[in-house]
Image (cartoon, grey):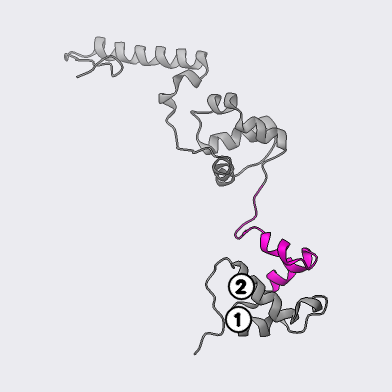
């Protein structure tokens, strides 16, 4: 069975767009009356009919101006999701917010956004939002960012760890050698 259309997804260059427009309308003076349908143009030029229809729709939206048609940006894929309002986006991109939330994973950030701003956001949407705004995101370990934690919580965690360590040292009959990673260098 022969393939009727070139089904590979790709962006059209200016020459291909012009070929579609000239095939549809015949000449420059006759842009208002389309003489050939999209399926026939698609067969002639080896494009999908949907691709031809999309180019012709853009051409009509550009009010039959070839220069505007050729200036249209390449945009394929899913449409961008907007996270809340513009004010919320500015807050999420502020240095203060990024510093305070540095220890939070994406899911935790989504929960925090829901609680504080009453906006539901999926973690992938938040990741794409950061990427689109030039912020790389790597998952962070909370124990590496103690300066971002609540001071009272940090104090309680340190006391609990010290109590656990002292119980271990005092209750066992074995000798314990303890190295604190923050002060030991080889």
Residue 45 is tagged as 1
Q: Position of residue 18 (x, y in %)?
A: 66, 73
Q: Is residue 8 visible?
A: yes
As drawn, 148 above or below 35: above
Return the residue nearer the eye: 82 or 170.
82
Q: Residue furthest toward the right?
A: 32
Marks 1 and 2 close (CB-CB < 8 Å): yes
Q: Position of residue 146 (x, y in %)?
A: 45, 20
Q: Which mark is residue 16?
A: 2
Q: Residue furthest bottom?
A: 1
SS class of the residue under badge 1?
A: helix
Q: Is residue 6 left or right of residue 82?
A: left
Q: Quadrant of the C terminus?
A: top left
Q: What distance separates the C-alpha of mark 1 from that of mark 2?
A: 9 Å
Is the residue marked by circle 2 packed among few (<14), some (14-19), or many (20+) residues within 10 Å?
some
Q: As displayed, is residue 137 above or below residue 4?
A: above
Q: Which mark is residue 141?
A: none
Magenta range: 53-81
Asked which quadrant contains residue 40, the reply is bottom right
The answer to whether one can see residue 50 in this image is no
Query: Residue, x 51% and y 31% (percent of image)?
Result: 104
Against 17, residue 126 (above or below) is above
Quadrant location of residue 19?
bottom right
């Amino acid at each position: 069975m022969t393939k009727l259309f070139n089904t590979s997804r790709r962006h059209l260059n200016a020459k291909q767009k012009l070929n579609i427009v000239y095939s549809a309308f015949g000449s420059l003076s006759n842009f208002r009356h389309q003489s050939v349908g999209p399926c026939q143009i698609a067969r002639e030029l080896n494009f999908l009919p949907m691709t031809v229809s999309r180019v012709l729709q853009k051409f009509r939206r550009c009010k039959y101006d070839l220069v505007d048609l050729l200036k249209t940006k390449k945009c394929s894929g899913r449409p961008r999701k907007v996270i809340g309002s513009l004010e919320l986006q500015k807050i999420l991109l502020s240095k203060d917010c990024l510093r305070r939330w540095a220890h939070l994973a994406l899911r935790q950030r989504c929960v925090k956004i829901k609680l504080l701003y009453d906006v539901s956001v999926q973690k992938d949407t938040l990741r794409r939002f950061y990427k689109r705004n030039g912020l790389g995101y790597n998952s962070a370990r909370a124990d590496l960012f103690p300066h971002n934690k609540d001071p009272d919580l940090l104090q309680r965690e340190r006391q609990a760890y010290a109590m656990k360590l002292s119980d271990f040292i005092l209750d066992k009959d074995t000798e314990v050698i303890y190295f604190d990673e923050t002060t030991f260098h080889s």
